[in-house]
Amino acid sequence: MSKMIIYTDGGARGNPGPAGIGVVILNDSNDIVREYCEYIGQATNNQAEYLAVVKAFDLIRACEIENNVSVESLEFFLDSELVVKQLNGEYRVKNKDLGALFVKIHNARAGYENVTFEHIPREKNKEADLLVNKAIDGALNRHKKPCLI
């Protein structure tokens, strides 16, 4: 498997408020490899967006180990224009909490030949958005376990 396509989303109800993350990972044949959602507690929308990307890197590494494969290229799609522009170096990261997450992502991406981050409209990120809402709804209804699918 030379390439993975990753859709991530993070959201909070209120800003900050109860927050969740969603990740959808596809292989280079566009087959879903893994879906993941998790309630992350109180966070801002931007923190949740960053944490979704961090978790995606963890899940990708787990997929590589489980399947004994090495991935060369990662294509990330996010509906947060701010986070994409920060990860692509177009905007500075001024918030220290986001800065720490930015560094984690920067270090994680060093293990791959090619990593891209692309902004997409919210309508094209529906699956990851559904996972975010599933995580938050589950937590608000007392089911705080990650939803690994």
Image (tube, helix red, strand yellow):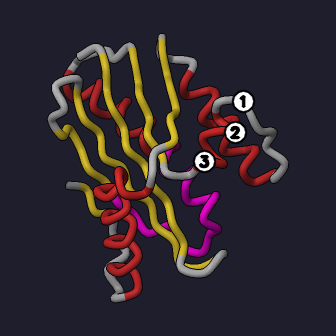
**Residue bearing mark 1:** 89
Secondary structure beneath dot 2 equals helix
Q: Residue at x 37, y 30 (%)?
A: 61
N-terminal label among 3 and 2: 3
Tag 2: amino acid: Gln
Q: Is residue 48 magenta?
A: yes
Task: Tell whether label 2 touches label 1 (CB within 8 Å).
Answer: yes
Q: Say above or below: 51 vs 133.
A: above
Tag 1: amino acid: Gly
Q: Residue at x 44, y 69 (%)?
A: 39
Query: Residue 77's spot in the image, x, y percent?
Result: 43, 40
Query: Which span is picked out in magenta?
Result: 37-53
Label 1 Cα crowd, 10 Å radius (few <14 / some 14-19 / many 20+): few
Q: What's the CA distance linking mark 1 and mark 2?
A: 5 Å
Q: Please state the total of marks drawn on the protein image.
A: 3
Q: Is residue 99 left or right of residue 76?
A: right
Residue 86 — which label? Answer: 2
Q: Say above or below: 8 vs 4.
A: below
Mark 1 or 3: the one toward you: 3
Q: Residue at x 36, y 53 (%)?
A: 125
Q: Is residue 93 left or right of residue 37?
A: right
In terms of image quadrants, where is residue 132? bottom left
Viewer-closest of 144 and 81: 81
Q: Is residue 3 magenta?
A: no
Which quadrant of the rendered structure holds the C terminus? Answer: bottom left
Tag 3: amino acid: Glu
Secondary structure beneath dot 1 equals loop
Label 2 Cα crowd, 10 Å radius (few <14 / some 14-19 / many 20+): some
Secondary structure beneath dot 3 equals helix
Query: Residue 126's spot in the image, x, y percent?
Result: 32, 58
**Residue bearing mark 3:** 81
